[in-house]
Image: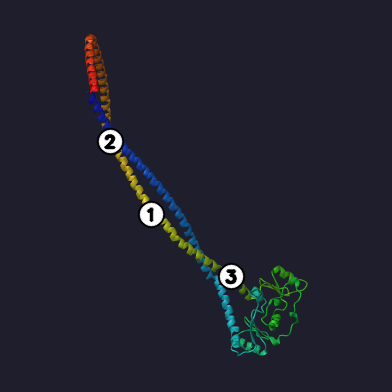
Amino acid sequence: MINAKTAAIDIARSERDALTQKAGAIQKAGKEAEENLQTRRTEHQGKTSQIEEYQGQRAGPQQDVQSAEKRYQVGIGFTTGDEMLISLSYRMHNNNSRSVITKPPLRVTKSKKQEHLDPRIGLKDRYSVVRSVSRAVVRFMGGTSWHFGHHRWDSNKCSNASNTSALITSVTATSMVLEKIPAENGMKKIHTPENAPRLFDLIKSKEARFAPTFYKALRDTLVAEDLDQANRVAYGATRWRVVTLAGRMFETPGTMSGGMDNPHRVRDSEDATRKLNQVMEEATQAESEFERLRRLGPGLDTALQKPGLGIETGKRSITGAERCVGDLWAQNKPNQGGLRRISVLDAGIESTVTELEQLSEKSGKIEQGIKVLERRILEIGGSRLLGQKFKVDGIRYEDSFDYATSTDAA
């Protein structure tokens, strides 16, 4: 009876443990799936942050590209705008004037049909404004005889030039006959206020014979660095004709002017040329920067594609992990049948254990009664039983001793 109850308890416990272990395994799998899902979400968040960083890096060069392209387009438009028109207008004016006045005699001289004609002479570029406002040495054409003057006079009439005299003056060129210019003693160096240089002394003539033509036109015109120096020099104890590097002319009567139209064109042209070169250089730099940034774009796009693919893969992986977690938790829902079975088993085990304890208690009492009865039996017929027992034990001892002795003798 006791063994049957013990076997029933073992069977019930085994079934209960199996059900409990199954539920625990499902719960463990659900927790592991949740941890895996959390890991994938963390990785996805990291990749998302990475692609946002790449997008920020991509947005910077894109703005730089747009800025560089805008600066390049503005530079191109500027170079084709007013500054270019000023430069082209000045060049057209000079070319037209020269073509009307200077080209014919120069062409005749080149063909050896006209003698006594020498090429034009002028001044360094630094003093181009000074030269122009001084009006007489913009362009000189010098001849060695009076025949040259008459030829220039005829040429000017044919070309509609105005105001021809002993110094035959045309639109942009002045022709001087060297043999008609008297010798001047003033060409020697003189003392000037504040050691301001004479414009005549600044001119480097190709040949010394042309020096009188320059002095005839310029006389003792002084060159000042700025208006302050020009005022001091022009209106001192002695009146001087002064011109500044900026193109301001101080005449001996005390008048001041900005020069004729030509110096302004010269300055406008020089400024326009300088601005044009500057803008073209900026446009070139902007174009180079634009090309560099434009080439940088595909590399960033490629860098963006890799995390993008990883993000898409991560999204699919997260979706699968979420589905797995849902399935596991669905499987881990309490099974009413299993719970009832476990309750029944627990109740049966508890009842059987109680019965087993009762049986064990009864069995103990029975065994105790048996021991009491054995003692009583021994007490009633114990002396006779003990004598027989001692006799049997003695016989057994003798038999074993004889057997041992015979064995030793053999």
The image quarter in which residue 355 lies = top left
Mark closest to the chain's N terminus, 3 or 2? 3
Q: Nearer the viewer, mark 3 or mark 1?
A: 1
According to the picture, the residue beneath numbered tag 2 turns out to be: 335
- Could you say which is closer to the camera, residue 309 or residue 171? 309
Residue 7 visible, this angle = yes
Give above or below for 33 relative to 364. Answer: below
Q: Position of residue 402 (x, y in %)?
A: 23, 19
- Could you say which is closer to the camera, residue 271 or residue 44? 44
Please indicate whether residue 85 sits to the left or right of residue 203 in the image: left
According to the picture, the residue beneath numbered tag 1 turns out to be: 309
Q: Position of residue 27 (x, y in %)?
A: 33, 38
Mark closest to the chain's N terminus, 3 or 1? 3
Q: Residue furthest front?
A: 409
Alpha-carbon span between mark 1 and mark 2: 42 Å
SS at circle 3: helix
Q: For the residue marked with disc 2, what is the amino acid?
A: Asn
SS at circle 2: loop
Please indicate whether residue 180 sits to the left or right of residue 111 in the image: right
Q: Residues within 10 Å of mark 2 (few under 14, many from 20)?
A: few
The numbered dot on residue 274 is 3
Alpha-carbon span between mark 3 and mark 2: 92 Å
Q: Residues within 10 Å of mark 3 (few under 14, many from 20)?
A: few
The image quarter in which residue 156 lies = bottom right
The numbered dot on residue 190 is none
**Residue at 33% from the left image edge and 43% from the top image edge:** 325
Check whether the beta carbons of the residues at disc 1 and disc 2 lie within 8 A of each other: no
Q: For the residue marked with disc 1, what is the amino acid?
A: Leu
